[in-house]
Amino acid sequence: MFRNLSISVKFSMLFLLVLGLIGSSYFLMLRNIYYAELHSQARTISENVIAFGSWVSQYGRVWVKDNDKSYLGKIAVMEVADPGEPAAKPPGAGPAHFYSKNPALAQREFSEAVARSSAPAKFRMTSDNFMNPANKPDAFESEALKIVKTKQLKEYASLEKDTYRYVRTLYHEASCLNCHTDAATAPADVKKRYASAGGFGFKLGDVAGVISVTMPAKSLWQTSLEVFGLIEATLVLLAAIIAFLFIHFVVINPIKSLTQAAVKISLGQPAELGINQVSQKSANEVHQLAFGLERLRTSMQLAIQRMKASNNKPT
């Protein structure tokens, strides 16, 4: 049945097939680019968090003034007014209280500040051996922790409906072991604050946990519509029109004309093949077909003349 279809119909079917393959390829490339961009953004966020933790760890802890919401240590320091600056408190009014934040606590408070912000991407620190109950992993994070440990991965990601989830593996460094090696040797303020059996038993290089990044993700259909709009659709339609005009005027119409001419030739009628202004060296297949029909016509005429001459010979 397909063999009996017209060239126009066959070309239309082929064009739609090619267009579908190109569209599928475009969709797959767009998906890979979009996922790569999400992954790059999530990795950048995790690296910034790690950099912030490294900045804190180079001092062991950072101390903040008058902030007792969350801390691991507290000291009181007598304030002395700077002669060049107005005193926040009158001299001798009492000590200023400073509260310490270790790298993990500073990073967690950083994540809480981001969670309260309008930033679309959020992050948190979590572990399957957590000290702070607030750091308990959710279902995805628990599964991700198993995967990164089993396969020894530095990162892992997954797309969940309209959310992109990413984890970056954290390893215990020397600065971490003061608090996480043994509960008996942990700082008193750590044990006092958390009173937890979790978060201990680690060695240098062990997986401490992960930085978990959560980002909103659009569907690939939404993403496709954002990059394929009216202009792109118009260009595809224009390409289709040009292709159909080409096949119609350059292939189909000339073949129809040659077919009609061949029928006339077969009936012994005069037929115009349109080869007077065409070079015989033309690479155009339609032109070569026309020359072939002209040779066939010439051969037929010679054969007919010979037959007539043979029939007119005296016996």
Image (cartoon, rainbow, N blue to C red):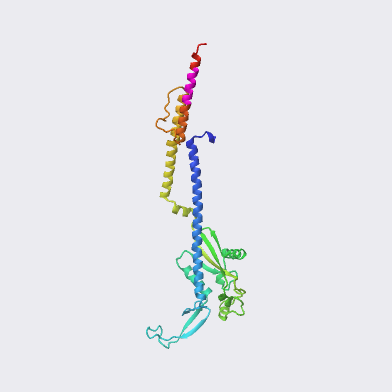
Position in image of residue 110 (x %, y %): 49, 71
Position in image of residue 235 (x %, y %): 42, 47
Asked if residue 244 is positioned above or below residue 142 in the image, the reply reads above
Considering the whole magenta stretch, tell me its main secondary structure.
helix
Position in image of residue 101 (x %, y %): 51, 77
Q: Which residues are magenta?
A: 296-307
Asked if residue 10 is positioned above or below residue 75 in the image, the reply reads above
- At 50% from the left edge and 46% from the top edge, which residue is drawn? 20
- Which quadrant of the figure has residue 190? bottom right
Q: Is residue 170 left or right of residue 92?
A: right
Nearest the camera: 302 or 85? 302
- At 46% from the left edge and 33% from the top edge, which residue is drawn? 288
Magenta stretch holds residue 153: no
Nearest the camera: 206 or 222? 206
Asked if residue 204 is positioned above or below residue 302 in the image, the reply reads below
Nearest the camera: 87 or 275? 275
Position in image of residue 165 (x %, y %): 53, 62
